[in-house]
Image: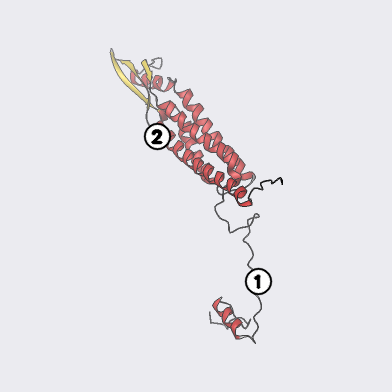
Amino acid sequence: MEDVTAVPHPRSDAAAPSRSGRRSLALALLFGALGAAVALLATRQQWAQGTATVAGGAFPLTARGSDVTGVPAALAVVGLAALVAVFAVRRAGRVLVAALLALSGAGIAAAALIGAADRAALDDKAAQAAGDTSATVGALSHTAWPYVAAAGGLLILLAGLLALRYGRQWPGMSGRYERGGAPRPRRSARPTDPERPEELWKALDRGEDPTGTDPAPGRP
């Protein structure tokens, strides 16, 4: 019996990277956009609450994420910009932008987790409410919103890791330009033989001057 070795079809080999590239691109866009939206939303919510003693009574205090730290919101905007910029650059530039995207997500997660146990924002509000710089907040408690912001940062981090791994397979913003950034040169038109009427008509259909002369002044 003859030993028959299966030869992989070239189209199937080329289609596999294409499918993985499209899938990773869709996931990166989803993770990046969703993570930025979640992080921005979480920073506007209440992260901590407590009370301050004012004139013998308890005064309730609350602190939003933006009161605790402005890092997650700022890095969420940076992450969105990096997600868009990934498609505007190629090669080494795409790797750098993808790394920035991943670092933005990691920074959001780290800042949110640190802010989950922060009390400085409420202590400042307690000092202002009591009129005493040494006053601190009492009955301090925290919500789950800092962890939601951290989850948004992890989604952006995943988008950055996908861009680092599969970004070379993703398309750019335009395919009209060569790698050097210059427009592709147009093919020179084939000279028209004036002795062949069919070539004159084809040249006219293409919008070319079959005579090879410049238009007269004043005429389009």
> Residue 144, position in %: x, y?
39, 24
1 or 2: mark nearer the eye:
1
Q: Which residue shows up at 50% across the image and 40% down it?
A: 27
Residue 86 visible in image = no
Whether residue 37 sits left or right of residue 12 in the image: it is left
Whether residue 201 sits left or right of residue 68 in the image: it is right
Do residues under tags 1 and 2 come within 8 Å of each other at their CB atoms?
no
- In-front residue for pair 160/60: 160
> Residue 71, position in %: x, y?
48, 31
Q: Mark 1: which secondary structure?
A: loop
Q: Which residue shows up at 46% across the image and 30% down it?
A: 151
Residue under label 2, please give it: 41
Residue type, mark 1 in image: Ser
Residue type, mark 2 in image: Leu
- The label on residue 57 is none
Q: Which residue shows up at 29% across the image and 15% down it?
A: 58
Residue under label 1, please give it: 188
Instruction: Locate residue 39: give its quadrant.
Output: top left
Instruction: Locate residue 116: give its quadrant.
Output: top left
Q: Which residue shows up at 36% across the image and 19% down it?
A: 126
Q: Mark 2: which secondary structure?
A: helix
Is 197 situated above or below 120? Answer: below
> Residue 157, position in %: x, y?
53, 34
Q: Mark 1 or 2 closer to N-term?
A: 2
Is 86 situated above or below 143? Answer: below
Q: Quick one: label 2, few (<14), some, or many (20+) residues within 10 Å?
A: some
Instruction: Locate residue 125: give its quadrant.
Output: top left
- In-front residue for pair 214/24: 24
Mark 1–mark 2 distance (CA, rounded to whole Å): 56 Å
> Residue 208, position in %: x, y?
58, 77
- In-front residue for pair 83/7: 7
